[in-house]
Amino acid sequence: MSSSGVSAAPITGSTTVVELLERYPGGEAAELMARLAWPCAHCSGALHEPISMAAKRHANRAGPVVRAFQALERGGPSEAEVAEAAAKYEKRADPAALWARYTR
């Protein structure tokens, strides 16, 4: 059950940013997004984007991000869960861009 008192579907990678913000009107989801350095809750740039895609866009791994948002349901996430979700990975170069570099 969420902080709004309404039972909702489980949080998955396809849960959207706007669904999370609606599910946690007390700001818990927005605060987690801020801790992950995601401006979604503030700029509304990709509100209807699934959190797995938002994770990819912001160079975070989707699994730890989804688990961190799931932890909101039990009063979390812990500092360790936030750190794991916030960790950035190096984005791979676009194969088409690499290929274009060699075909000039």
Image (cartoon, grey):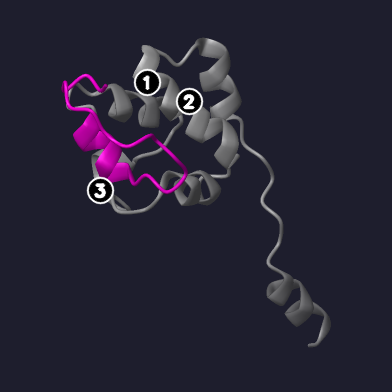
Q: Residues within 10 Å of mark 3 (few under 14, many from 20)?
A: few
Circle 2: residue type? Ala
Q: Is residue 93 above or below residue 89?
A: below
Q: Amino acid at mark 3?
A: Ser
Residue found 29% across the figure and 29% down from its top: 30
In the rendered image, which residue does mark 3 sit on? 44
Q: Amino acid at mark 1?
A: Leu
Q: Residue furthest right?
A: 102
Visible in this render: residue 60?
Answer: no
Element at badge 2?
A: helix
What secondary structure is the stretch in magenta mostly built from? loop
How many callouts does the rendering have? 3
Quickly name the residue at label 1: 72
Q: Quick one: SS at disc 3?
A: loop
Asked whether disc 1 touches disc 2, contact meaning CB atoms under 8 Å apart, the reply is: yes
Residue at the (23%, 24%) spot, across then down: 27
